[in-house]
Amino acid sequence: MLPKPVKSELGFTLLWTVTTVSGFLFSLLFIEIGEKADVGILQAAIGSFAIALPQSLILRIRIFSLMWVLSTVLGWVVITAISVGAMGWIVSTSQFFPFRVVYGSIYGAIGGFAIGFFQWLAISQGVPLAWRWILVSSLSWAIAIPVGSIVGMFLYFISRLFLGEIVGLAITWLLVAIITGINADKILG
């Protein structure tokens, strides 16, 4: 008798992380990184679609993937419309360390909550602990934005190249992908 295959939590998290970060990098073909006022609703919709579509392919066995894409895009459009901003594609204009930490955490928590809420709408059917996704999303962005922003600030300070800020955003997305990937596997089971 053959042993049953072991479900790999690490495998899902790694696939989720690679997919999410790749989606972010792909979105950069269509969206110019900028300040809060530079990234509008259309850019947020395009960028979130570039990330949500590949994520939905991973989730298609567990949820109705079209709903994941629509709810993710809607979440990003809403946070951009209410002036939280398309936080995954904007950099802070401040070079003041405490500002980046405090405001990054606040905007990350608010934006992550809104995105998580809309994504919860896609996963709530048949997933008993789906409400936890809202908290995971909020917490992941509240952690990742200040960390990525600080790294970006230091890289910019050292190199005097805006590319440092873009690397900081990539680190933000990497952290969000890891945190949400670990938890998505647990929540969606």
Image (cartoon, grey):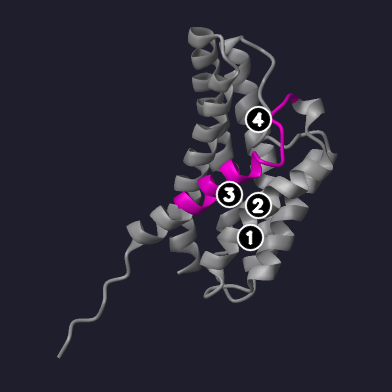
Give the mark nearer the N terminus: 2 vs 3: 3
Q: Which mark is residue 23?
A: 3
Element under label 4? Answer: helix
Residue 155 belongs to magenta span: no
Q: Is 100 rendered above or below residue 75?
A: above
Measured from the top left, where is residue 144 in percent x and y? Answer: 53, 34
At 32% from the left and 70% from the top, the residue drawn is 7
Residue beneath disc 4: 106
| Residue farthest along the left direction in this orientation | 1
Q: Which mark is residue 175?
A: none
Residue beneath disc 2: 50
Q: Amino acid at mark 2?
A: Ala
Disc 1 + disc 2, Cβ < 8 Å? yes
Give the mark nearer the N terminus: 3 vs 1: 3
Disc 3 + disc 1, Cβ < 8 Å? yes
Q: Assess disc 3: are there few (<14), some (14-19) or many (≥20) residues with their C-alpha within 10 Å of its C-alpha.
A: many
The one of 105 and 49 positioned closer to us in this rendering? 49
| Residue farthest along the front direction in this orientation | 29
| Residue farthest along the bottom direction in this orientation | 1
Q: Is residue 139 left or right of residue 46?
A: left
Disc 2 + disc 3, Cβ < 8 Å? yes
Q: Quadrant of residue 80?
A: top right
Q: Assess disc 2: are there few (<14), some (14-19) or many (≥20) residues with their C-alpha within 10 Å of its C-alpha.
A: many
Give the mark nearer the N terminus: 3 vs 4: 3
Measured from the top left, where is residue 27 in percent x and y? Answer: 65, 44
Q: Quadrant of residue 110?
A: top right
Estimate the spatial distance between the alpha carbons at disc 3 and disc 1, rounded to whole Å.
Answer: 8 Å
The one of 172 and 113 positioned closer to us in this rendering? 172
At 77% from the left and 54% from the top, the residue drawn is 74
Residue span colored magenta:
17-35
Estimate the spatial distance between the alpha carbons at disc 3 and disc 4, rounded to whole Å.
Answer: 25 Å
